[in-house]
Amino acid sequence: MPNSSLLINKKATKLLGWHFLAWLLYTIFLHIAAMLTKPDISIINTLLYLLPFCFTFYISIYVLGINKKKGVAWTIASFFIVFIFMASLGYFYVYFILPEFGIVVYTSKQFKPFIQEAVLGYVRFFSFAMLYFYIRESIRKEKNLRLLQQEKSQRELENERLKQQELKAQQEKLQYEYAFLRSQINPHFLHNTLNTFFSQAMQYSPEFADNILKLASIMRYSMEALEFDSGKVSVQKELTHLQNLIDIHNLRFGERKMIVYEIEGNINGHMVPPLSFITIVENAFKYGDLTDPNCPMTIKVGLTPGEVSFYCSNKIKKSSVQISSSNIGISNLSKRLDVAFSNRYKMNAEKKGEMYFFYLTIKA
């Protein structure tokens, strides 16, 4: 704040200095011109003659600035307002004040010359004031406009830089997470191994072999999911592999399974992040109690024009402790939703008593 005040004071002092210099030069010029006709005229007489016109100049600038937004109409009005005021003041100055100092410019009988000089002098100095005022305002507006444009450009550049940084950070984080997932296991080796197991299992149990084939299909889907640039797959593809996951777990739990699985609406045309439903259902299988007929695992998929809704609930195993891997899966899903469906989804997971509930809504 002190630096700002000091800067303002410096600017005001500099401006005052320029005005003083301009008036000094004009006074010298006017005095030299007067000496051509009146060699004995003193500098004091020149200053006293110039004084009312100097007031005219600054009063005109002040009046023009009072309602400057009114434009030409106010400029014309200002001309007559200042003239009436300064003519009255000048009359008092010339006929009453100057004679007190022994300076007689016009006698009481010389009113016409006074009016002529007053009008000519006033028009000249009002024109000077108007020219100065509008040049100053033009420079000020141009400077303010330039500053606004610079600030706008800086804000736009800063916003763009922040957006690029945020997008780059999100992309790098997802790449690191995908790389981490890839590093845990060689997925191609596992996929080929599962195909080998499928061929061998066909000789003993077609049902078991079929589940191996479904697991291999899920593995292939998970590998493909890492390559989707858009971060989206069709709901049809996601539901196909979700059914494969349910079928595999049906073999695991046999007759003890308790699953309610419903799909409502038209599947065609809807998109979701890959492995979005599968991640949640796999957690439910891992941490859920599927032996209570009163609390079955419930999976519901609702498909309406422009919206996909997914719901999953399960009873929590009493002996299980939900470790951080579940949260990692949901956190990773949230990040992928941010990239593919920013501000167009709602996700909520909550635990109530022995039950765990998950809700997801995605808008096209």
Image: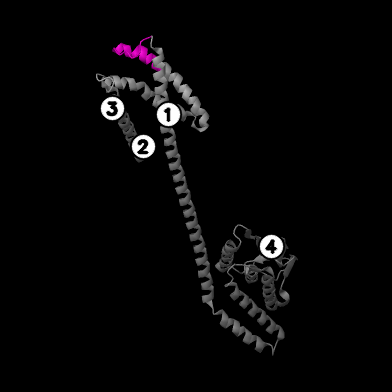
Task: Describe the element under mark 4 as helix, strand or loop.
Answer: strand
Give the residues in magenta.
89-108
Question: Closer to the N terminus: mark 3 or mark 4?
Answer: 3
Q: Amino acid at mark 1?
A: Ser
At label 2, which amino acid type do we have? Ile
Q: Is residue 122 left or right of residue 319?
A: left
Does the rendering let one see residue 317?
Answer: no
Q: Earlier in the sequence, mark 3 or mark 2?
A: 2
Mark number, residue 8: 2
Picture quarter with the C terminus: bottom right
**Which of the two discs, 4 and 1, labels the residue nearer the N terminus?**
1
Q: State the predominant SS element of the stretch in magenta.
A: helix
Relative to residue 127, is residue 90 depicted above or below? above
Residue 127 is tagged as 1
Label 3 sits on residue? 28
The type of residue carrying mark 4 is Val
Q: Mark 3 is on which residue type? A: Ile
Point 41% across, 18% down: residue: 116
User: Is disc 3 surrounded by few (<14), some (14 to 19) or many (20+) residues within 10 Å?
Assistant: some
Q: Measured from the top left, where is residue 71 in percent x and y?
A: 51, 32
